[in-house]
Image: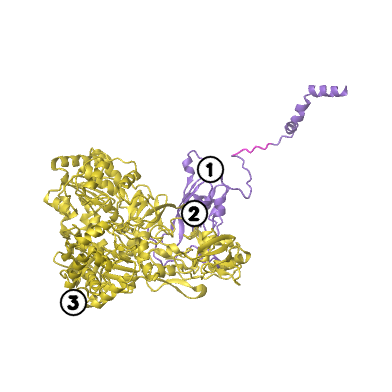
């Protein structure tokens, strides 16, 4: 008897719906919005955030990149293209003559940053890269360096002889004749 | 039967020939023993200690690279003890090796990198400062980074054992050992690139492609080198359609991975900025860019008009022997069927024809009856006028291997003196050397034959089989006096007798004939005389014996076999061989043109006199090769139609009415036939440059427009047709089987064939210049090939230009002293035809009385030369002249 009454009561007061909407109704009373009013409001990014890629420089303004193509090899989606050469006027020293990133394809996995032996690549906290023309996302070396310049104001100190234990690393020999192009 | 031993390696049972090294036996069962200093081409050195293995019943670890396999041996390569040994060896190497893999060109294909990944922990216990060598400039093409060196000495041993150049040496002791060249100035060697290829790490790399690539980016194409007749297999490595470097894998091709400077550093010729990229057509006296349609239609129209007006024999065709067999075959078919003339010639006319003629005459083959392997296993080698280390460096390596590793007796008759030099000199290895002037080859050969006859060394079976022949030759050489031969060669009669004795003693003898003979007056006759020598000594017809004329251009042999010559149809068979004509007519469904045809010099003469109205020239530059005294320029200018298919705007192409851009060997598919008659595939490494097309495609398109279509889908289709018509083109296998001498032809030669021209062949001839001491200012100028270039073609390769960028007048220091000239002096060289000013280079290897000038830079030197044409084979000779030398003011 009692059982039948309870069932009837639950039916007429829409008990299941109330249970189901418990959280909703609770928030109806204690209103606290979680939507961010982007672009007026912005989220706090975690420390390990993987944003736009950038090329970095040493404290004296020289590029860190030695043009070793390891980022190109590590990239799973063929974003990077490096054209390496000898630094003009600095025989036997290697650098990237041209450096391209096709950001339309980038997964922001960060494997290129891990692969870089000289820490020349960095992931910035920039993510606002929506553009009307996809071609603007094909970045060249100057653009990537500019991103690095604005995102990493503190630069690493450059050492000519990086450490006696690694012996010479990418050093120019001025007495050598330059490579003929 | 080879003695074998059974051994066990890591549980695998294997039977190997006795004397096999454990490392090689392990390789056969698929066990890779890590090593740095071991290389199959080199003698074991066991200095790197990387290949240590455990062998049962031996108290200590053994080096697998120097331990021969023994019966019942049980080898273990992956035990804890062995791994510990690997670890400690690598720890010592890595104690000093810089961590510059990211900028090292070897990174990615480095043995040390691979072994470190496999055998070492990621950290090192060494905290000491690494060894640093002061960097010294090495050479324009080869870069050293001694900090990376692991001191395996492979480069030093390769340079000595294989190349016989000895340009490198280790200096210093222990970890401070450094690879150096002997002198204080930059490296001056053969630049074969062997040290670059053999270095297991990045200590020696190519400066030419430095920093342009990483190994994993490279796309490979196995093809054949385009320079000399050796036909080395090369692997062209490209990155995004750019030529990056050339390698040759150990064991690959006829060269077994060895290359010369031309092959290793000469590849940039294909992408030279001067390459023709569009058809050019002459309008108002100027060559202007045109479309393919315009150019081809104009050519077809003009050619049809001229053919109607003057007949097919007013046309001439000339093709360069750097073209593929497919190009050559289609060219002769085009000339014979579409145009309808036998006026066909190729650059094989400059010399190769001489050798082929002699071989066909005496033994009925048009190829060598020996292979490179027979040269290596020969017991006696006779080199006549080859300068083999410069003209055919890889054949030279085979000769070096025969002499150095197998103790063959080497006899050389060369315009060379044995001398210590920066590049190897075959005369240094000779047991019997005859240094002669360019016209002394014949007297020296006759001296050898005279010694054979007079010392009763004539083969008895031959004397019984062909008494008439032996009698006639004996009488002919007996008529020559030893005094005259000694005067002509500068060598004593005893030296000829000694040389002949050591030659006849052996069971396997090979005679190599070089450009000094083939590109000289009566080259064909002298080659036949050398075959006489082989017949008389009884070597002829034995396995591994034969006369081998060396080809200068990579497809000289192919040009003859494809029938790109007036006297040969594809096969090659004689142009008036009725059976061959019938067979070809059936295959081509068209009658072949009759009439004798004109050779290169006759075509030029015809153009001058006006009987020749039009010429098709494919990849050949007669205006740039023949001296101006031949009047080629004027002759070609008077033509009504000159069509050139060229890579570059050469001297000849500048005179043309239409220039059609052809593609180089790096862009086309096809086959080349090397000097030993080995047919090898050419594969494209890069895409066609600009609008250039393969030569066969251009000819095919022209044939359609001229109303006689010779249409093919690709080069393979042409090759199929070649295969059905020409013997020896069936299989493109790794080991060619040389043809045997045709006994019927040999017998007819021994019966009657020898007698024609015997008197001329067995005379010493007029001395054009006396060798030895001269009092006046005259010298014999000889225009020759050098190691670093091949024809004019390679003078567009930037790598080779860094080694040799210009010609120098090389003469013996004794002549230098006599004429008051020092190294680097400017000299004025003149004769009645003209003069030139050039730089002096003093070289011990040049015989006294002779001066050498490289033909690759002979634009000026050509003015001093006169052409003489061989009446029998129509071969033009223009290599030497008598000149007066004086110091320039």
Q: Are marks 2 and 1 on the same chain?
A: yes
Marks 2 and 3, how far apart in space?
A: 71 Å
Q: Quadrant of the C terminus of chain B?
A: bottom left
Marker disc for residue B483: 3
Q: Can you tell which chain is drawn purple?
A: A
- Predominant SS of the magenta segment: loop
Residue receiving disc 1: A129
Marks 2 and 1, how far apart in space?
A: 25 Å
* Front disc: 2 or 1: 2
| Foreground of the two, B503 or B320 | B503
Q: Residue at x 17, y 49 (%)?
A: B597
Q: Are marks 3 and 1 on the same chain?
A: no
Tell me whether the residue at label 3 lies in contact with that at label 1, contact meaning CB atoms closer than 8 angstroms: no
Marks 3 and 1, how far apart in space?
A: 94 Å
Marker disc for residue A69: 2
**First in sequence: mark 2 or mark 1?**
2
Residue B636 visible in this rendered orientation of the protein: yes
Disc 1: host chain: A
In percent of width and height, residue B176 lies at 50, 73
Secondary-structure class at tag 3? helix
Find the magenta span and give its range: A33-38
| Foreground of the two, B295 or B337 | B337
């Amino acid at each position: 008897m009692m059982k039948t009454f309870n069932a009837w009561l639950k039916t007429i007061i829409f008990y299941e719906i109330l249970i189901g909407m418990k959280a909703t109704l609770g928030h109806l009373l204690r209103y606290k919005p979680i939507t961010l009013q982007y672009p007026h409001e912005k989220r706090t990014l975690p420390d390990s955030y993987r944003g736009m890629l950038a090329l970095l420089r040493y404290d004296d303004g020289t590029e860190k990149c030695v043009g070793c193509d390891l980022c190109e090899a590590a990239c799973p989606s063929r974003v990077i293209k490096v054209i390496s050469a000898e630094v003009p006027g600095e025989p036997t020293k290697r650098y990237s003559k041209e450096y391209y990133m096709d950001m339309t394809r980038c997964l922001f996995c960060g494997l290129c940053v891990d692969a870089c032996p000289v820490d020349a690549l960095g992931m910035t906290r920039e993510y606002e890269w929506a553009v009307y023309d996809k071609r603007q996302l094909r970045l060249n070396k100057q653009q990537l360096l500019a991103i690095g310049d604005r995102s990493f104001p503190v630069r690493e100190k450059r050492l000519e002889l990086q450490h006696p234990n690694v012996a010479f690393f990418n050093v120019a020999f001025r007495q050598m004749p330059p490579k003929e192009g | 039967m080879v003695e074998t031993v059974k051994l066990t390696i890591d549980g695998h049972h294997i039977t190997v020939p006795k004397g096999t090294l454990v490392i090689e036996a392990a390789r056969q069962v698929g066990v890779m023993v890590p090593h740095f200093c071991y290389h199959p081409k080199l003698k074991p050195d066991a200095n790197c200690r990387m290949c240590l293995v455990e062998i049962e019943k031996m108290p200590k670890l053994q080096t697998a690279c120097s331990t021969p396999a023994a019966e019942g041996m049980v080898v273990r390569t992956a035990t804890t003890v062995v791994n510990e040994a690997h670890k400690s060896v690598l720890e010592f190497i890595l104690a000093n090796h810089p961590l510059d893999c990211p900028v090292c060109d070897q990174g990615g294909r480095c043995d040390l990198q691979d072994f470190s990944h496999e055998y070492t922990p990621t950290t090192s216990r060494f905290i000491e400062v690494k060894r640093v060598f002061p960097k010294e400039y090495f050479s324009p093409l080869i870069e050293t980074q001694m900090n990376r060196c692991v001191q395996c000495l492979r480069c030093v041993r390769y340079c000595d054992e294989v190349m016989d150049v000895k340009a490198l040496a280790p200096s210093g002791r222990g970890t401070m050992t450094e690879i150096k060249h002997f002198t204080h100035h930059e490296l001056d060697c053969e630049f074969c690139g062997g040290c670059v290829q053999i270095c297991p790490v990045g200590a020696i790399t190519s400066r030419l492609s430095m920093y342009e690539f990483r190994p994993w980016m490279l796309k490979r194409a196995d093809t054949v080198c385009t320079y000399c007749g050796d036909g080395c297999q090369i692997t062209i490595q490209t990155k995004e359609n750019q030529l990056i470097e050339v390698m040759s894998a150990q064991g690959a091709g006829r060269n077994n991975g060895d290359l010369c400077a031309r092959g290793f550093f000469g590849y940039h010729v294909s992408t030279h900025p001067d390459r023709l990229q569009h058809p050019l057509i002459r309008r108002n006296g100027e060559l202007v860019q045109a479309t393919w349609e315009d150019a081809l239609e104009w050519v077809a129209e003009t050619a049809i008009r001229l053919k109607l007006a003057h007949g097919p024999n007013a046309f001439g065709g000339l093709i360069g022997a750097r073209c593929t067999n497919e190009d050559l075959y289609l060219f002769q078919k085009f000339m014979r069927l579409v145009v309808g003339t036998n006026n066909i010639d190729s650059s094989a006319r400059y010399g190769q024809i001489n050798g082929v003629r002699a071989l066909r005459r005496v033994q009925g083959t048009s190829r060598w009856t020996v292979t490179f392997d027979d040269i290596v296993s020969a017991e006696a080698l006779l080199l006549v006028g080859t300068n083999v280390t410069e003209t055919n460096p890889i054949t030279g390596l085979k000769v070096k291997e025969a002499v150095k590793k197998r103790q063959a007796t080497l006899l050389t008759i060369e315009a060379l003196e044995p001398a210590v030099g920066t590049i190897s000199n075959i005369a240094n290895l000779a047991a019997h050397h005859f240094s002669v002037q360019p016209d002394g080859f014949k007297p020296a050969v006759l001296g050898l034959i005279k010694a054979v006859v007079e010392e009763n060394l004539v083969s008895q079976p031959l004397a019984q089989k062909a008494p008439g022949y032996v009698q006639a030759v004996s009488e002919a050489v007996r008529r020559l006096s030893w005094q005259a031969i000694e005067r002509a060669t500068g060598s004593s009669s005893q030296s000829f007798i000694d040389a002949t004795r050591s030659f006849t003693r052996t069971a396997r003898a090979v005679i190599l004939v070089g450009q000094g003979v083939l590109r000289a007056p009566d080259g064909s006759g002298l080659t036949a005389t050398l075959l006489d020598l082989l017949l008389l000594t009884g070597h002829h017809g034995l396995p591994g014996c034969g006369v081998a004329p060396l080809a200068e251009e990579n497809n000289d042999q192919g040009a003859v076999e494809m029938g790109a010559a007036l006297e040969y149809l594809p096969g090659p068979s004689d142009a008036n061989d009725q059976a061959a004509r019938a067979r070809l007519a059936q295959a081509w469904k068209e009658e072949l043109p009759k009439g004798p045809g004109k050779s290169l010099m006759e075509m030029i003469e015809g153009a001058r006199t006006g009987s020749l109205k039009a010429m098709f020239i494919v990849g050949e530059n007669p205006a740039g090769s023949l001296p101006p005294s031949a009047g080629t320029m004027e002759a070609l200018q008077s033509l009504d139609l000159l069509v050139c298919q060229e890579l570059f705007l050469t001297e000849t192409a500048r005179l043309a009415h239409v220039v059609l851009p052809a593609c180089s060997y790096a862009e086309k598919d096809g086959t080349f036939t090397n000097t030993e008659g080995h047919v090898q595939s050419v594969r494209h490494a890069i895409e066609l440059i600009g609008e250039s097309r393969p030569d066969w495609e251009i000819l095919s398109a022209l044939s359609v427009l001229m109303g006689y279509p010779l249409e093919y889908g690709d080069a393979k289709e042409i090759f199929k047709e070649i295969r059905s018509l020409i013997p020896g083109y069936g299989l493109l296998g790794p080991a060619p089987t040389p043809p045997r001498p045709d006994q019927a032809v040999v017998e007819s030669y021994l019966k009657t064939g020898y007698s024609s021209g015997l008197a001329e062949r067995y005379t010493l001839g007029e001395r054009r210049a006396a060798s030895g001491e001269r009092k006046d200012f005259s010298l014999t100028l000889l225009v020759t090939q050098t190691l670093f270039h091949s024809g004019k073609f390679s003078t567009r390769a930037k790598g080779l230009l860094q080694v040799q960028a210009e010609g120098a007048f090389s003469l013996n220091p004794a002549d230098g002293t006599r004429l008051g000239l020092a190294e680097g002096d400017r000299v004025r060289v003149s004769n009645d035809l003209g003069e030139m000013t050039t730089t002096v280079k003093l070289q011990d290897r040049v015989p006294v009385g002779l001066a050498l000038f490289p033909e690759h830079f002979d634009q000026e030197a050509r003015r001093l030369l006169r052409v003489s044409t061989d009446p029998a084979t129509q071969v033009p000779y223009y290599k030497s002249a008598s000149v007066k030398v004086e110091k320039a003011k």
